[in-house]
């Protein structure tokens, strides 16, 4: 499970990441990244942690399938959240193919999208 301090919950944060961030797509998911966003209301001098949120629509499948995809993505992001710069907002949007993808395929697509965003791969 993704720790509480790394969860993206506010609608404004989702909108900021999707509208103002960069994105990288793979067959089963799209990642939106708004790197280095600072929260002026955050206490202390340290940089805020990277926060991640997930969007899994009904196009992915029924409730059971959507929840399974969300659980898998949260589990995968738990180990990868430290790869992003501090203060980043990350939104992982599952595409309809994510419902049929197994855990290994989701991991490959997530790693490839992260590499493209952070590695500066060609578009």
Image (tube, helix red, strand yellow):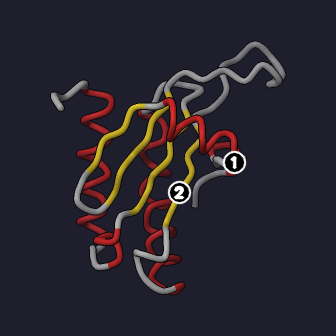
The percent coordinates of residue 10 (x first, y second) are: 72, 47
The percent coordinates of residue 61 (x first, y second) are: 42, 82
Secondary structure at numbered mark 2: strand
Tag 2 or tag 1, which sits nearer the N-term? 1
Residue beneath the point at 50% across and 51% down: 78
Q: Closer to us: mark 1 or mark 2?
A: 1
Query: Residue placed farthest to the top in the image?
Result: 45
Residue beneath the point at 45% across and 52% down: 92
Query: Residue placed farthest to the front in the image?
Result: 19
Residue 41 numbered tag: none
Residue 99 lies, with reference to residue 24, above or below; the image says below
Residue 99 lies, with reference to residue 45, above or below; the image says below
The percent coordinates of residue 49 (x first, y second) are: 63, 32
Secondary structure at numbered mark 1: helix
The percent coordinates of residue 50 (x first, y second) are: 57, 35
Query: Residue placed farthest to the left in the image?
Result: 122
- Residue tagged by mark 2? 54
Q: Is residue 36 left or right of residue 108?
A: right
- The picture quadrant where one finds residue 121 is top left
Residue beneath the point at 50% across and 30% down: 20
Residue beneath the point at 30% across and 41% down: 24
- Which quarter of the figure is the C terminus placed in? top left
Q: How many marks?
A: 2
Residue 39 lies, with reference to residue 117, above or below; the image says above
- Which quarter of the figure is the N terminus placed in? bottom right
- Residue tagged by mark 1? 11
Q: Is residue 61 left or right of residue 100?
A: right
Confirm or deny contact between disc 1 and disc 2 (CB under 8 A).
no
Marks 1 and 2, Cα distance to the nearest angstrom?
A: 12 Å
Q: Nearer the viewer, residue 115 or 21?
A: 21
Crowd class of label 2 (few under 14; some 14 to 19; many from 20; radius 10 Å): many
């Amino acid at each position: 499970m993704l720790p509480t301090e790394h969860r993206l919950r506010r609608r404004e944060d989702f909108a900021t990441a999707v509208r103002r961030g960069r994105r990288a797509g793979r067959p089963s998911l799209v990642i939106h990244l708004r790197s280095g966003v600072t929260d002026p209301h955050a206490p202390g001098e340290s940089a805020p942690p990277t926060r991640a949120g997930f969007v899994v629509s009904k196009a992915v499948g029924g409730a059971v399938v959507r929840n399974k995809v969300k659980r898998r993505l949260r589990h995968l992001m738990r180990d990868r959240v430290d790869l992003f710069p501090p203060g980043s907002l990350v939104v992982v949007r599952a595409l309809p193919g994510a419902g049929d993808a197994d855990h290994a395929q989701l991991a490959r697509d997530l790693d490839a999208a992260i590499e493209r965003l952070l590695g500066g791969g060609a578009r």
